[in-house]
Image (spheres, rainbow, N blue to C red):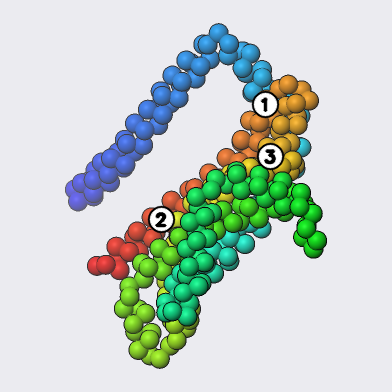
Amino acid sequence: MTRRPGKGRRTIALKDRLTPVLISLVSVIIVFGAIAYFVGSAEQWPRIQSQFFSLDAMIEAAPSVARGFLVSLQIWVISLVCIGIWALVLAIFRAMSGPFFAPLRIFAILYVDLFRGLPALLLVLLFGFGIPALNLPGLPNNGLFWGGVALVLSYSAYATEVYRSGIEAVHEGQGMAAKALGLTQWQTLRYAILPQALRNVVPAMLNLVVALQKDVALLSVLGVRDAVREAQIYTARTFNYSSLVVAAILFLLATIPLARLTDHLARRDRQRRLQSAL
């Protein structure tokens, strides 16, 4: 007699957990099924399907688009490292107080205002075409290099503000305690402020990582043989746009796991903050 109620409660609890999942699954199937039926019933759908979703064209274009996507990933990784370092330096410039560090603070403020206010595509065009045309001695004339520099400069402005928000989120008592122990301003930042600030900004920084992974495709306007450019070459040769769908799929395969990781870390960060507040 004592076991049956327990089993009943477990059964009810299991139903309570499964019912919302089943309802959500059925709702998704109905909505996307209706969209598929509506699109598939269009008069021009067979033509669109052959032009954009041809399986044979996707298979044919996949090797070259995949090679271009590897180029995109290499640019992305190198740019991430440069952005993370340079943005942290700028954030430190802004965090330093005192009249001696005023030129560094002003430089960081002007830098953020300038590069955050300019579109990334405009910077890519200006740097990718303009600087190589100058033929400056001692500097590379590669459009790929200068396009990557443009992305680094643009995204560093945003990342600097993310770092700064993390630094300002650290309670000022932490800095006062470090100074009371005799630490200098730099030592306070290095040992007391920055470790906490970097942990606080991880979710926000991952959002920038996802955005940068997509904006690397902007370098295709410079002729860089990335995934988008390879897809465009195939389209120009065959007048079939299925290669662009292949490129889109590759970008989704890279960005969706990063987006889910960002959400996971954001939830963990909220839980940590709630536990520390109790």
Label ID, residue 221: 3
| Amino acid found under the numbered disc labelled 2 | Ala
The residue that disc 2 covers is 266
Kindly identify the residue that appears in the image at 57 percent across and 40 percent down: 252
Kindly identify the residue that appears in the image at 50 percent across and 50 percent down: 117
Nearer the camera: disc 1 or disc 3: 3
Residue at the limit of the structure toward the top, as seen here: 43
Of pointers 2 and 1, the one earlier in the residue sequence: 1
Residue 13 coordinates in the image, percent (x, y)? 27, 44
Q: Secondary structure at mark 2?
A: helix
Residue at the limit of the structure toward the left, as seen here: 1
| Amino acid found under the numbered disc labelled 1 | Ser
| Amino acid found under the numbered disc labelled 3 | Val
The answer to which quarter of the image holds residue 25 is: top left
**Relative to residue 193, is residue 210 drawn left or right?**
right
Q: Secondary structure at mark 1?
A: helix
Of pointers 1 and 3, the one earlier in the residue sequence: 3
Label ID, residue 242: 1
- 6 or 151: which is nearer to us? 151
- 86 or 127: which is nearer to us? 127
- 236 or 105: which is nearer to us? 105
Distance of mark 2 from mark 3, alpha carbons? 34 Å
Where 232 falls versus 109 (above or below)? Answer: above
Distance of mark 1 from mark 3, alpha carbons? 20 Å
